[in-house]
Amino acid sequence: MFATLIAPLLVLQAVGEAVVAVKNDNPETWTVEYPRLIQPFVQDYRRCLKVANRTVTGIANFEAQHAADLPRCAERRAKAIAESNAALAGAKTAMSPEEVDQLFATIGRIHIARGADLDRQFRQRLAGAEAARAAYEAGRPKGLVIELHDASVVKARTDASAAVAAEQDKDSQ
């Protein structure tokens, strides 16, 4: 009976120390691995970085906006590092304080890289819109004139085109 009570606790403890991998949209660029034991602290820091009002100003400045999140969340990062080191102190999974610090620094670099990626996408869309505009301008008829006529001119043209159509019908029969 004692073994059946302790077995779930041992399983839960083993689950708490499993390695968690967080990958960026492009897995060739970023891979961050850390013990599952410190996942709440990592998520708390990442949440702080993500929760911000982004301003779309018509220029590519998302990288700068993302970089501004690091000082804003510096206190949360320091707390997360301290809590992670405390949680890992007696754990089976060994991660040195330097590795923990490097982990959170990498998470910050990933956050800034996401902003840089948004800037690239923004510039590409602007370039695509400019290319579409240039293609339209190149194919657009030059010297387009809009004619404004009163009703008598329109009626005269309609009567004339009706007469021409009648003549073509007679010729084709």
Image (tube, grey):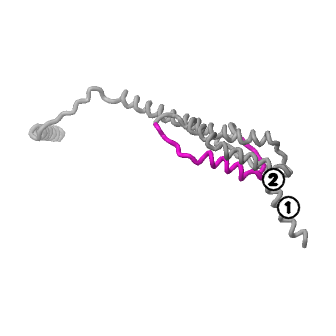
Tag 2: amino acid: Glu
* Residue highlighted by disc 1: 10
User: Seen from this angle, which residue lies furthest right?
Assistant: 2
Q: For the magenta stretch, what is the residue range? A: 31-57
> Does the residue at mark 2 contact the one at mark 1 (Cβ under 8 Å)?
no
Name the residue rendered at 53%, 46% in the picture: 53
Q: Which mark is residue 35?
A: none
Name the residue rendered at 68%, 50% in the picture: 43
Residue 76: image location, x then y, percent: 67, 47
Lateral position of residue 107 relative to residue 115, left or right: right
Q: Which mark is residue 17?
A: 2
Name the residue rendered at 52%, 43% in the picture: 54
In three-dimensional space, the C-alpha distance between marks 2 and 1, rounded to whole angstroms, equals 11 Å
Residue 140: image location, x then y, percent: 33, 30
Residue 170 in view (yes/no) = no
Q: Quadrant of residue 31?
A: top right
Tag 1: amino acid: Leu
Lateral position of residue 107 relative to residue 3, left or right: left
Residue 83 vertical placement versus 65 (above, below)? below
Query: How many other residues sit within 10 Å of disc 1, few (<14), some (14-19) or many (≥20)?
Result: few
Lateral position of residue 116 relative to residue 125, left or right: right
Label 2 element class? loop
